Amino acid sequence: MAETLLTNPGESPARAAGLRGIADDWSSDQRAFKNVSWGKAMMWIFLLSDTFIFSCFLLSYMTARMSTTVPWPNPSEVFALEIAGHHIPLILIAIMTFVLISSSGTMAMAVNFGYRRDRVKTAVLMLVTAALGATFVGMQAFEWTKLIMEGVRPWENPWGAAQFGSSFFMITGFHGTHVTFGVIFLVAIARKVWRGDFDVERRGFFTSRKGHYEIVEIMGLYWHFVDLVWVFIFAFFYLW
Amino acid sequence: MVDVPYDARADAPPAEVPEVELYHPRSWWTQYVFSQDAKVIAIQYSLTASAIGLVALVLSWLMRLQLGFPGTFSFIDASQYLQFITMHGMIMVIYLLTALFLGGFGNYLIPLMVGARDMVFPYVNMLSYWIYLLAVLVLASTFFVPGGPTGAGWTLYPPQAVLSGTPGQDWGIVLMLVSLILFIIGFTMGGLNYVVTVLQARTRGMTLMRMPLTVWGIFTATVMALLAFPALFVASVMMLFDRLLGTSFFMPALVEMGQQMKYGGGSPILFQHLFWFFGHPEVYIVALPAFGIVSDLISTHARKNIFGYRMMVWAIVGIGALSFVVWAHHMYVSGMHPKFGFFFATTTLIIAIPTAIKVYNWVLTLWRGDIHLTVPMLFALGFIITFVNGGLTGLFLGNVVVDVPLSDTMFVVAHFHMVMGVAPIMVVLGAIYHWYPKVTGRMLDDWMGKFHFWVTFLGAYLIFFPMHYIGLLGVPRRYHDIGDTSFIPSSTHTLNAFITVMALIVGFAQMVFLFNLVWSLFRGRPSGGNPWRATTLEWQTPETPPGHGNWGKELPVVYRWAYDYSVPGAAQDFIPQNQPRTTPAVQGAAP
């Protein structure tokens, strides 16, 4: 019985804090991360792996940029826009960053309402997040179009090192793909929330597993990660 | 002793997670083809890996025929020879060994050994296999496309991998890179499952320090693979762009056929760094599962607890961590700064410490053990010897000054075939002999097994020992025909012919093994549930082969570590992990 087990010798009723607690958890049976579901653990580990992918991309780009013998195009100039007669450097990127970071805010709110099992607010906030994400991708498409019109290609550009275009399209493209996948999954999960799948624990079409509101938080982990990666791309590619 | 009423089941903490619902197959298709059961997926992985591995085996025969009897086989020209080398290496390292150890053994053994019903996300696990199969098909298709497979060598070094002088420049290299990208995506899906299953889905009483070393090896290798494959993924994507879009990530300014190419400003060395940041951990991704499995084979068949279990675990983890800071020892001749060489030589030699701990512990486990010379045990012993041999030449090659003259000679080929070719294959074979009874319910034939072992083991030595010598003489690797070179004595040709004959013999011995696999499936002696009288959970399943969900109604509860063999005072010479302690006083040597 559970009651007798709670008083089992050697088992302290409350888990120790700090390092001691971590050591206890890792020496225990069943789970190394207590109170972490399988799905959440899997997402965290996937994100760790994905971090290595983005790190390799960014390190490769930095290598190219540092070792090039021809001048690197000035990002402030390349990514400047003429708005109402004003020449504003990096304005589009600034707006894109603002949009994406705002979407992280709405995502966090969606997670919060998800745990309160507030079906409508969760779904709406997820859709807002998806819309902001789609806006981001749209602005990225605009930026790509503009650069392509100006003659930037993966293999060459009018202003200097060819690796500028290569790295730009590859890194922003890979990040944009992540955002796009995120938008697709946001919409799919928002639909399930809206329909009430997680209130009735409806089974998944492929997996036949019961759905839970926790998937909103797992989705949020991915979304915040994609957002965080953008901050690094922004810093290393545009601000350098 | 005071007579205390003792509740054995209270030894294990209460279940933290409710029972998971499994996917139950509804038709023949979902039961055997699109199966979500880790055991079926494991067999699918193993069969696919073995099939493509056989292709690589045949390629090695063709290469050896050319090297042993140059000029005799007119159908093997220089381009084809390079293509054979490339495909042989790539298939063996990635599509056979990685897939077999992690996708095959990992899928079969992890859930059974940690007492889970299945992997945590069976659907994702299934996708993992189908993407892997797709990767294998894309790879195999390169044999049939115009220009054939790429001949860039398994390391795919740019710029030559992308240039027209290399065979397979049209389609081969493109499909190779696509196949690698697919493999990594598929592997990631499986790998996440293995890691989360080990961390979060163990049964009651199964602490990390009670897990069999097999699980530790596969788990650590999977974590490494999840962190190392990204580098290969990125390198493949970038090289694909270099080849298809004309970017210059890895391509410096080049003149080809008197024409200045459009490439310029890229760094071939960057590729080498990315490739080996993956490539060196990859060596241990293959080796660590082998270390783990061999520990269990030795302990079981020597009827003795593994010596220094905790040390073994920490050695596995330590090797895994260290293997991420040694990659540039593959690049001593790339022109990098000598101080880098010094750093990487140091870290490389430090790896010898945990590795030596493991070897000593295996030997100490055998010492005064009740050694049963079963076929799995023979292969385990063969592994220890081969691994020590291959490891010692690793010390040569890890030192910059010794490596530089030996670089790109047959000595290197002999070294890595001993240490990461023959040694892990020995474990794979031993493990198949060990677990085949659990998978099929029948024993493999003993006589054929012993024949297979002795021919493989002695044959491998007769192949690779002379190869070290040829390498010391200065015979370069990857040469289609060494011809009459002044510094190479003519006796080399005799040795080459000898090696070729041995390679053919060892290759054909594997056919005996394949025959044994099929024959024993129908005619083998019924094995019962636990033929080796082993302690680990997979031998304690209610059914053999284990049914869907592995454990019948109730999950097993674990009371002890995996190595209670020959415990003094115990009724049998082994105590299964799920056997409760009868009284608190009589305990195994369990931690």
Image (spheres, rainbow, N blue to C red):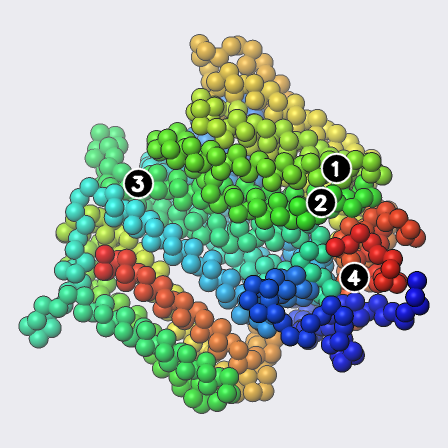
- Characterize the local packing of mark 3: few (<14), some (14-19) or many (20 or more) Cα atoms within 10 angstroms: many
From what the image shows, is residue B364 above or below residue B499? below
Asked if the residues shown at circle 2 and circle 1 are in contact, with their CB atoms under 8 angstroms apart, the answer is yes
Answer with mark 4 or mark 3, whichever residue precedes in sequence: 3
- Characterize the local packing of mark 4: few (<14), some (14-19) or many (20 or more) Cα atoms within 10 angstroms: many
Asked if the residues shown at circle 1 and circle 3 are in contact, with their CB atoms under 8 angstroms apart, the answer is no
The answer to whether dots 1 and 4 both sit on one chain is yes
Q: CA distance from mark 4 to mark 3?
A: 56 Å
Residue placed under numbered mark 3 in the picture: B267
Answer with mark 1 or mark 4, whichever residue precedes in sequence: 1
Residue placed under numbered mark 2 in the picture: B308
Q: CA distance from mark 1 to mark 4?
A: 25 Å
Residue placed under numbered mark 4 in the picture: B559
Answer with mark 1 or mark 3, whichever residue precedes in sequence: 3
Residue placed under numbered mark 1 in the picture: B364
Please indicate, yes or no, whether residue B441 appears anywhere in the rendered image: no
